[in-house]
Amino acid sequence: MHNIRQISPSLHWVGGNDRRLAYFENIFPLPQGISYNAYVLTDEKTALLDTVDYAVLERYFENVDAVLGPRKPDYLVVHHVEPDHAAGLMQVVQRWPEIKIVSGAKTLQYINQFYDTDFASHFLEVKEGEELSLGSHTLKFYFAPMVHWPEVMLSYEVQEKVLFSADAFGTFRALPGSLFNDEVDFEADFLEEARRYYANIVGKYGLQVQMALKKLAGVDIRMICPLHGPVWRSNLDYILQKYDLWSRYEPEDKGVLVAYSTMYGHTENAALVFAGLLADRGIEHIRVFDVSETHFSYIISDIFRLSHLVLAAPTYNAGLYPPMHTLVHDMGALSLQNRKVAVIGNGTWAPASHNIMQKMLAEMKNMQLLAEPFLLKSALSAAQRPALEALADTVAASVKEKT
Ligand code: FEO
């Protein structure tokens, strides 16, 4: 049975929700699912705006049929060819052979690669700033390379002032029947998953997100229709400001994330003592994670949120304990920058983790080490407690600094 939502008399949501997929991109846990949004715009001509993932393709076609009835779609606008949105492309073309696929040149290259088919005869190439009239509605196209693949295109419907934003402004978490941001408690129910989605999926491309935001700065946008998560029809500044902060790698809150690895609990003990010392010093936002327990995508998300970061890990095989290595490597891969950091290493013989973490952080941009790495020899000793308190003084003072 179809399951559509009307956005305006001419615009419908025809996507689907997937609560059965365990890992997005086979990496990121989806405990609350994900939505694949797609839209249909009807006028003298009709346009499908993207397709969906295979998981919900049957629903998509039921939804499109429910909106269009006996009409055939004239256009399929492809904003992004990643298969969570373009998996239905071949079936769309097989169902409606006269349909025109509207997108940029890179899209044609990529869909030909994915499907090992030449779609050139179905393709209507558009360039930056070009428009496509559907009747009283007009789509204007903007390219947003690397948000989050090179071919990504945004479109703006001129009459209703709607931005179709591809992955930008998307979130993990399936839609609860509600579609619009003002039908949900976004801050309570979606913000963490929106940040986790941004940080891990788009986070590497802050510069390109900034370029897209600047390109759209003069456009009168009344509604944002992303490919995942709620449609924004009110309070657009809220999500635009979050994206501006995240893409400039600026923290949302002053606070400390303590991420630790531990083999037998000794590094954990030092990390937890340290977190308590921060609390003693009045630090409000403290988040503590065992990197072996918590999927790195959640830790990365909170690193994007908070101003300060403390990493604590043992030495392992003369290197850095592998789960911590994965986390720090991912921070670098995502171009994380502009954080104040401290490092706690541990080693029973030939300790190395402190130096490796320091070196990896030094390779990232503007990661300010607040003190020399703190070295544990097997376990935190009573003799070292004053030094740990001094490190807590330093980190707490930095958090409280007025900037
Ligand atoms: Fe939702 Fe980049 O795909």
Image (cartoon, rainbow, N blue to C red):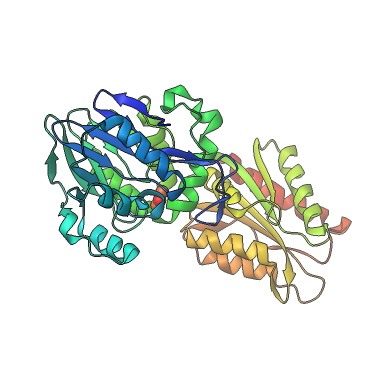
In the rendered structure, the answer to whether residue 123 lies left or right of residue 1 reads: left
Percent across and percent down for residue 313 are 71, 62
How many marks overall? Answer: 0
Q: Nearer the viewer, residue 315 or 78?
A: 78
Q: Nearer the viewer, residue 150 or 343?
A: 150
Percent across and percent down for residue 298 are 59, 48
In the rendered structure, the answer to whether residue 18 lies left or right of residue 75 reads: right
Tell me: residue 212, above or below residue 70. Answer: below
Residue 35 visible within the image: yes
Q: Nearer the viewer, residue 156 or 187?
A: 156
Residue 218 visible within the image: no
Percent across and percent down for residue 61 are 35, 40
In the rendered structure, the answer to whether residue 221 lies left or right of residue 375 reads: left
Residue sitting at 49 percent across and 52 percent down?
Answer: 200
Q: Nearer the viewer, residue 236 or 161?
A: 161
Q: Quadrant of residue 312?
A: bottom right
Instruction: Single out the residue that lies furthest toward the right.
Output: 382
Tell me: residue 217, above or below residue 28. Answer: above
Tell me: residue 206, above or below residue 284. Answer: below
Residue sitting at 53 percent across and 58 percent down?
Answer: 331
Percent across and percent down for residue 235 are 38, 25
Image quadrant holding the N terminus, namely: top left
